[in-house]
């Protein structure tokens, strides 16, 4: 997901700086809470792993320009389930920044919009997980329905934010509405695929839990709250 250059221009782009700052502030609050809970080494390692994964999502995985943006396989709920809210959010921001600096500098003016579009849906996933998953259930024991709900929340949030930026920048003309609709339709495949990836990753983690260092993953992956 990259908002195409030119979708939001001029003074309008200032809004993206404010939304990115707000999303980043909440992510840092989560990071501070995680730091107090498990210490710097664990959150730092999980953030590095999340960043590396996000960089692969954007740079290595297939991606296609559709309508007003690009369709990427961004496994936001997978990052959340493996690493926790703060490392996932920081990884999304840092991985996107690294990809822009190294390979796509033309995307950097849209960084505020793109990072908002990635992080805010993750915050929604974090809130939903607290309501949807019982305190006594580790993430490795999630059902398909729960994984689907988390994935739909994340990917649906991306589509909503992309639509917001497109309509904010270009208005509600027929051509722009068709471009947003094409992008949203293309993301249906990602919404279907991500919960399957989540369950496969969680099953692999459950099978190999004895050989996995606990500090590499969120504590909730294997333990109850």
Image (cartoon, rainbow, N blue to C red):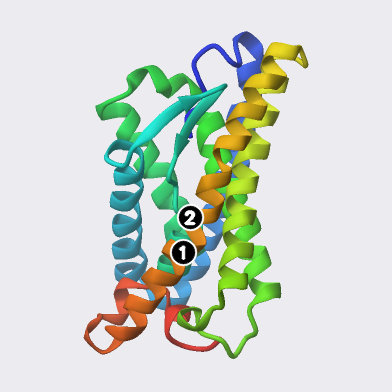
Left or right for 133, reference 32? right
Identify residue for label 2: 193
User: Element under label 1?
Assistant: helix
- Residue 123 in sight here: no
Side of 185 relative to 171 (left or right): left
Tell me the residue at 56%/87% (across/down).
137
Q: How many labels does the image show?
A: 2
Judge whether 3 appears above or below 72 on screen: above
Q: In which quarter of the image is the C terminus?
A: bottom right
Which residue is found at the position 59% from the left and 90% from the top?
136
Q: Is mark 2 on a helix, strand or loop?
A: helix
- Residue 11 or 52: which is nearer the viewer? 52
Q: Where is residue 11 in the image (x, y as percent from the top left)?
A: 65, 12
Q: Is residue 178 above or below residue 217?
A: above
The reply to whether the C-beta atoms of the residues labelled 1 and 2 are less than 8 Å apart is yes
Residue plotted at (61% across, 50% down)? 121
Residue 148 as seen in the image, left or right of residue 72: right
* Residue 97 in sight in this render: yes
Residue 146: x %, y % from top left: 61, 71
**Disc 1 designates what residue?**
196
For residue 205, which quarter of the picture? bottom left
For the view shown, which residue lies furthest in the left direction? Answer: 211
Q: Nearer the viewer, residue 93 or 187?
A: 187
Query: Residue 10's image quarter?
Result: top right
Q: Looking at this rendering, what residue extends furthest in the right direction?
A: 172
Across and down, in percent, residue 197 comes to 42, 62
Residue 64 picture location, percent across and down: 42, 29
Q: Which of 167 and 34 is in front in this view?
A: 167
Q: How far apart are marks 1 and 2 (CA)?
A: 5 Å
């Amino acid at each position: 997901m990259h908002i195409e250059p030119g979708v939001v221009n001029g003074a309008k782009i200032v809004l993206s700086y404010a939304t990115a700052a707000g999303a980043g502030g909440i992510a840092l609050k989560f990071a501070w809470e995680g730091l107090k809970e498990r210490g710097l080494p664990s959150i730092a390692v999980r953030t590095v792993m999340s960043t590396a994964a996000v960089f692969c999502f954007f740079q290595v995985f297939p991606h296609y320009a559709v309508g007003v943006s690009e369709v990427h396989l961004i496994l936001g709920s997978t990052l959340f389930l493996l690493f926790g809210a703060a490392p996932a959010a920081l990884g999304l921001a840092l991985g996107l920044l690294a990809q822009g600096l190294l390979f796509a500098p033309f995307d950097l003016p849209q960084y505020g919009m793109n990072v908002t579009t990635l992080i805010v849906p993750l915050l929604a996933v974090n809130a939903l997980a607290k309501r949807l998953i019982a305190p006594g259930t580790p993430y490795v024991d999630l059902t398909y329905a729960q994984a689907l709900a988390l994935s739909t929340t994340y990917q649906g949030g991306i589509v909503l934010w992309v639509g917001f930026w497109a309509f904010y920048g270009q208005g509600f003309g027929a051509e722009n509405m068709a471009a947003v609709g094409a992008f949203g339709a293309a993301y249906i495949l990602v919404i279907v695929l991500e919960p399957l990836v989540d369950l496969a990753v969680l099953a692999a983690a459950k099978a190999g839990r004895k050989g996995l260092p606990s500090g590499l993953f969120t504590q909730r992956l294997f333990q109850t709250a």
